[in-house]
Amino acid sequence: MSVQWIEHKGKRILYSDHRGQTPHQITEGAELSAKLAREVLEPEKILFLTDLEGAVVDIVTLAKIKQLGKEVYEPKCEKTAIVGIHGLNHMLLSAYNRVTGAGENQKLFDTQEEALEWLVS
């Protein structure tokens, strides 16, 4: 599991690398990401990048991520970029973002480089 602060073009980004991980590993990483995000003092907002390429997400993990999203990520994140969601899951999350308005601050990308460029733009 790799959750860390990285820098891209002079901007600090909270990066959560879940490539190829199991649901348990993803849950642990999400909790660590939330802990680091909580440590950021108001009014500062964070840029967040998560990579789920090849990861396996189950219903329990999804529920935990949704809970942390409402409690931590939504109020703390200026922008969230997600890499590695494909096919039907990509379509469903994109539709959800459009309906809820989350799409303005949360976007899905095919590559980390695209995600990083959007985060710092």
Image (cartoon, grey):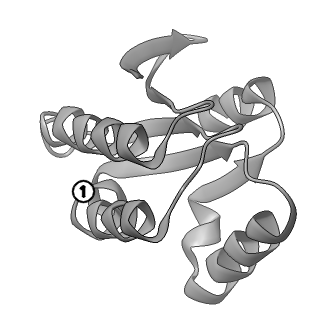
Q: Residue at x 54, y 36 (%)?
A: 49
Element on which disc 1 rests: helix
The residue nearer to you, when weighing 55 against 39, is: 55
Q: Residue at x 53, y 33 (%)?
A: 18
Q: Quadrant of the N terminus?
A: top left
Return the residue found at the far bottom. 99
Q: Residue at x 34, y 47 (%)?
A: 27
Q: Is residue 94 left or right of residue 58?
A: right
Q: Mark 1: give few (<14), some (14-19) or many (20+) Cα within 10 Å.
A: some
The residue nearer to you, when weighing 108 against 105, is: 108
The residue nearer to you, when weighing 44 against 40, is: 40
Asked which quadrant contains residue 45, the reply is top left
Q: Residue at x 65, y 89 (%)?
A: 99
User: What percent of the width, then of the height, locates residue 2?
Assistant: 42, 19
User: What percent of the width, then of the height, locates residue 10?
Assistant: 52, 10
Tally of numbered tags = 1
User: What percent of the width, then of the height, locates residue 65?
Assistant: 38, 60
Report the amino acid beneath label 1. Answer: Val
Q: Is residue 35 left or right of residue 82?
A: left
Seen in the picture, residue 65 relative to 42 is either above or below; the reply is below
Q: Quadrant of the C terminus?
A: top right
Asked which quadrant contains residue 109, the reply is top right
User: What percent of the width, then of the height, locates residue 20?
Assistant: 62, 31
Seen in the picture, residue 77 relative to 13 is either above or below; the reply is below
Which residue is the site of mark 1?
Answer: 72
Q: Is residue 38 left or right of residue 81?
A: left
Seen in the picture, residue 28 relative to 66 is either above or below; the reply is above
